[in-house]
Image (cartoon, rainbow, N blue to C red):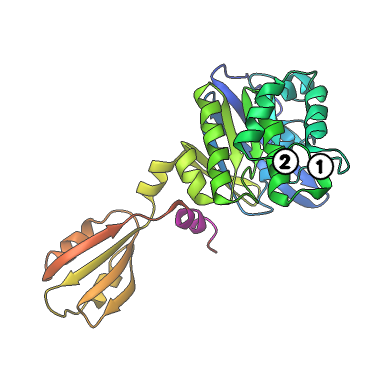
Amino acid sequence: MNASQAVTPGKDLAIQVRGLTKSYGKVRALHGIDLEVKRGEIFGFLGPNGAGKTTTIRCLLDMIRPDGGKAFLLGLDPQAEPVAVQALSGYLPGEMQFFDNLTVERQLRFFRDMRGGRADWSYVQQLAERLDLDLKPQIKNLSKGNKQKVGVIQALMHRPELFLLDEPTIGLDPLMQQEVLALLREANAAGATVFFSSHIMSEVETLAGRVAIIRAGEIVEVAGIETLTRRALNRITVRFKKPVEMTDLGKLPGVEILAQADGSSVTLQVQGDMENLIQALGRLPVLDLETERPSLEEIFLTYYQK
């Protein structure tokens, strides 16, 4: 982003990023990313390890300084007002650090004290109960999953306006994953914005309204879940009344034959407009056909194919 281009914080935006860049020595982690998340959204941030997800979140909270670009959280500049930004935010890092000799309760009270006591302890207890977390053991005696619960609670406990969560359900069993997602939906229903990264595509698909896909430090797509699934590859299985020659189907634009069985059935992958395929099938003795939309995981992987 050109330094002369002023960025004004948008009133309706919880997160606003323009031209964000960051390098670690010779390694360029972020290549001038642009991103906008509306207030009240649940927004997924997708990418493999090393794509730049964690670096982006840390820049947003002024935990590390970007080399260039500008960011606003809830209309505030995190570099100019880091304390105010962090007071309004609930952050869950990918690797949470604790004082191992403290009990769970003392650790959570410490987090509460660090926020100036801005957390209702009865709400903390309620969260612990919902996540089936015992407050008495020492942190060092907890499993990875229970440590993750402590991290989730400290992000939720002060009822922030904005959540920035790096893999919030990692290490949790399926029941606890669903409980965390329920808590995030409830926070969102109460007005909070949720921005989270995840490798679990099913939870992104059920939780997020929009997603951004980051690859090698660049945002390659921002779209609604439904838009992505409609735009992506479709899979079609066609069964014929009698064996047919189907080689020509694989020559159609955007059509690839995935499997066939003795000329009596074929499974096709179709990208884009299906008009040519429909016309070709109209000339064949079709018995029936089934269409299957790809999962978000399959869509995501198409962005990483070489």
Q: Which residue is mark 1?
A: 97
Query: Mark 2: few, some, or many residues within 10 Å (few <14, many ≥20)?
Result: some
- Percent coordinates x, y for residue 113 in the rendering: 82, 23
- Percent coordinates x, y for residue 284 in the rendering: 13, 70
- Percent coordinates x, y for residue 286 in the rendering: 13, 68
Whole-angstrom CA distance, mark 1 to mark 2, is 9 Å
- Write the start and end of the magenta stretch as one range: 297-304
Asked if residue 221 is among those painted magenta in the image, a careful observer would answer no
Quadrant where the C terminus is found in the figure: bottom right
Quarter of image, res 49:
bottom right
- At mark 2, the secondary structure is loop
Q: Is residue 5 visible?
A: no
Q: Amino acid at mark 2?
A: Pro
- At mark 1, the secondary structure is loop
CB atoms of marks 1 and 2 within 8 Å: yes
Quadrant where the N terminus is found in the figure: top right
Q: Which residue is mark 2?
A: 93
How many numbered discs sit on the rendered protein? Answer: 2
Judge whether 147 appears above or below 42 on screen. below
Prevailing SS of the magenta stretch? helix
Task: Please name which of the two marks, 1 or 2, marks the residue nearer to the observer.
Answer: 1
Question: 198 or 305: nearer the eye?
Answer: 198
Residue at the extreme bottom: 262
Residue at the extreme right: 101
Q: What residue sits 22% from the left and 60% below the top?
A: 276
Question: 184 or 285: nearer the eye?
Answer: 184
- Percent coordinates x, y for residue 111 in the rendering: 79, 29
Q: Amino acid at mark 1?
A: Gln
Query: Mark 1: few, some, or many residues within 10 Å (few <14, many ≥20)?
Result: few
Question: 160 or 12: nearer the eye?
Answer: 160
Question: 153 or 92: nearer the eye?
Answer: 153
Q: Is residue 210 visible?
A: yes
